[in-house]
Image: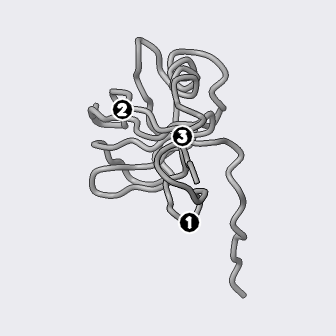
């Protein structure tokens, strides 16, 4: 009998960011860029370590511990064992959420209202 995990919704909203970090594995330091961040984890481009390995993310003189959940050739997804509640990465996440425009028009044509021009005149 196989045991399948049912997919669950993420408990945190991911936010696009661009944060240069240094990732410390067991044997090496690797430069990377966090491109997707939430209180529970991040996607780091430019760095890759084996899945299920532990690492440290160095940013602004602080260290955040993480576990690699998935890994590809030039990027990886990490989960934080302790949710971000303070510190430099937490501050960068909340700064990115404040700057992010909340009233952008829908990207897909099917979600746009019918009308003429940017203002939707009919």
Verify CB contact (< 8 Å) between mark 3 and mark 1.
Answer: no
Residue visible at 67% across and 51% down in the picture: 10
Residues 12 and 77: in front is: 12
- Rendered image coloring scheme: one colour
Residue lying at 57% horizontally and 15% vertically, measured from the top left: 87
Residue at the spot of label 2 = 23
Q: Residue furthest front?
A: 122
Separation of marks 3 and 2 at Cα, in angstroms: 34 Å
Mark earlier in primary sequence (1, 2)? 2
Disc nearer the start of the sequence (3/1): 3
- Classify 61 as above or below 47: above
Image location of residue 68, percent across then percent down: 47, 47
| Residue found at x 54% / y 40% | 104
Q: Quarter of the image holding residue 3? A: bottom right
Image coords of residue 118 (percent x, y): 48, 45
Task: Give the percent coordinates (x, y) of residue 115.
Answer: 56, 56
Mark positioned earlier in the residue sequence (3 or 2): 2
Determine which of the numbered discs, if any, sits on residue 95 in the image. Answer: none
88 in relation to 9, above or below: above
Is residue 10 positioned above or below 6 on the image?
Answer: above
Q: Which residue is mark 3?
A: 104
Q: Tell me the crowding category of disc 2: few under 14, some 14 to 19, or many 20 or more residues within 10 angstroms, Cα based.
A: many
Q: Secondary structure at mark 1?
A: helix
Image position of 13 (left or right of 118): right
Q: Which residue is pictured at 39% across the width and 41% down the height? A: 44
Please tell me whether mark 3 sits on a helix, a strand or a loop: loop
- Whole-angstrom CA distance, mark 3 to mark 1, is 15 Å
On screen, residue 22 versus residue 16, left or right, reads left
What number is the disc on residue 110? Answer: 1
């Amino acid at each position: 009998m196989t045991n399948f995990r049912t997919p669950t919704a993420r408990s945190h909203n991911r936010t696009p960011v661009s944060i240069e970090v240094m990732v410390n594995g067991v044997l090496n330091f690797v430069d990377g860029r966090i491109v997707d961040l939430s209180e529970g984890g991040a996607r780091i481009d430019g760095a890759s370590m084996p899945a299920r390995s532990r690492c440290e993310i160095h940013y602004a003189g602080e260290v955040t511990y993480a576990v690699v959940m998935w890994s590809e050739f030039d990027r990886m997804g990490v989960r934080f064992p302790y949710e971000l509640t303070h510190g430099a990465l937490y501050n960068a996440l909340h700064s990115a959420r404040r700057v992010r425009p909340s009233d952008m028009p829908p990207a897909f044509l099917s979600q746009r209202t019918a009308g003429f021009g940017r203002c939707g005149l009919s």
